[in-house]
Image: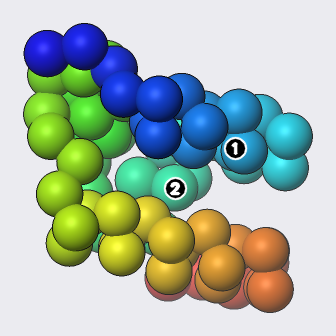
Amino acid sequence: MEQSIELRCWQITLRIWGIEQRELARRCGYSEEHMSRLFGGKRRLTPKVRERMADALRRILLDPQAVV
């Protein structure tokens, strides 16, 4: 599977905001390995995963110091 344009946009967004992939994974409740496979195109970006990532990103941006 190739990395989708949407996942590339996610990577750019994380880079712009200075958010590490592992932090997003932690806030989503996923392992770093799972997130790495997702961004590497080895796992599909399902609607559920997309929603969890968006929710996690919102929480990070609204309260970056919050502990999950």
In the foreground, 35 or 43 = 43
Q: Quadrant of residue 43?
A: top left
Residue 31 percent across, percent down from the top left: 26, 48
Identified at 79% across, 74% down, the residue is 61
Find numbered disc 2 in the image and state the secondary structure of the residue it sits on. Answer: helix
Closer to the chain start, of discs 1 and 2, is: 1
Determine the image quadrant of residue 42. top left
The quadrant in which the N terminus is found is top left
- Where is 37 relative to 47, above or below? above
Q: List x then y, in percent, for residue 37.
A: 23, 27
Does residue 39 appear in this view?
Answer: yes
Coordinates of residue 60 in the picture (x, y in percent): 70, 73
Q: Check contact, mark 1 vs mark 2: CB within 8 A.
A: yes
Residue at 36 percent across and 28 percent down: it is 4
Q: Give coordinates of residue 66: x percent, y percent.
A: 69, 85
Image side of residue 15 versus residue 20, left or right? right
- Disc tally is 2
Q: CA distance from mark 1 to mark 2?
A: 9 Å
Is 63 placed left or right of 3 in the picture?
Answer: right
Mark 1 or mark 2, whichever is nearer to me? 1
Q: Which residue is mark 1?
A: 14
At horizontal 34% and vertical 63% (from top left) the residue drawn is 50
- Secondary structure type for disc 1: helix
The crowding category of the residue bearing disc 2, from other C-alpha atoms within 10 Å (few below 14, some 14 to 19, many at least 20), is many
Q: How is the image coloured?
A: rainbow
Q: Amino acid at mark 2?
A: Leu
Task: Kindly identify which numbered label has been placed on residue 24.
Answer: 2
- The residue under the point 57% across, 43% down is 10
For label 1, count other residues whose C-alpha is less than 10 Å away and answer few (under 14), some (14-19) or many (20+).
Answer: some
Under mark 1, the amino acid is Leu
